[in-house]
Image: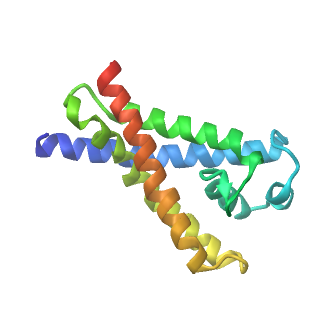
């Protein structure tokens, strides 16, 4: 992959990753406002920046080592969104062996918004501590989008 192709991929990844984060956040807000999810736990207390916390929790339905079944439908939507985004940023120019790496470009746009949301949560929610949010930030901002976006990129080079 040449420099020009990498620059194009980085731009596509930044835009697509930011769009995926924004759409995923929208899914969480709509699900919360319309009552599509069971009235349980955090969903009954969500307002304003609290949706950011729910959005981050929705990436990991096994939250605090016990299943949070209320998050599973939203988690599946977020997973499909990230796989689709990884698929979308991967073009025909990527080699068969580079599909996974190309799909991971969504992290370029996804991580900064996850970081900004984490900072906002730390500033507005006294119950949220930086020590507890560091692993969440790394999982939600880097690991999950890299794995799912990479899966989408791999699917793109195999099935396009």
Q: Is residue 159 left or right of residue 131?
A: left
The image position of residue 68, as x and y in percent, is 74, 52
Residue that protrudes farthest toward the front in the picture: 65
x, y percent for residue 103: 35, 40
Relative horizontal placement of residue 37, taking residue 122 as reference (left or right): right
24 above or below 126? Answer: above
- Rendered residue at 23%/37% (across/down): 98
The outermost residue toward the top is 160
Q: Quadrant of residue 142?
A: bottom left
Observer-nearest of 108 and 11: 108
Residue plotted at (55% across, 40% down): 79
Count of numbered labels shown in the rendering: 0
Q: Quadrant of the C terminus?
A: top left
Residue 48 percent coordinates (x, y): 74, 62
Q: Is residue 90 above or below residue 116?
A: above
Q: In this figure, which colouring scheme has been used for the structure?
A: rainbow
Looking at the image, can residue 70 be seen? yes
Q: Residue at x 74, y 42 (%)?
A: 30
What percent of the width, then of the height, locates residue 53? 67, 62
């Amino acid at each position: 992959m040449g420099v020009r192709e990498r620059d194009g991929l980085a731009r596509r990844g930044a835009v697509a990753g930011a769009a995926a984060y924004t759409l995923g956040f929208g899914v969480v807000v709509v699900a919360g406002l319309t009552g599509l999810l069971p009235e349980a736990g955090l969903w009954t207390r969500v307002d304003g920046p609290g949706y950011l916390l729910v959005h981050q929790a929705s990436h990991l339905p096994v939250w605090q080592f016990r299943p949070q079944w209320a998050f599973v439908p939203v988690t599946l939507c977020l997973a499909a969104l990230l796989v689709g985004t990884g698929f979308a940023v991967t073009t025909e120019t990527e080699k068969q062996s580079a599909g996974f790496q190309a799909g991971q470009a969504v992290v370029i746009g996804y991580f900064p918004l996850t970081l900004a949301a984490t900072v906002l949560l730390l500033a507005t929610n006294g119950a949220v501590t930086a020590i507890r949010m560091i692993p969440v930030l790394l999982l939600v901002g880097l690991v999950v989008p890299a794995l799912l976006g990479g899966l989408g990129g791999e699917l793109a080079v195999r099935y396009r």
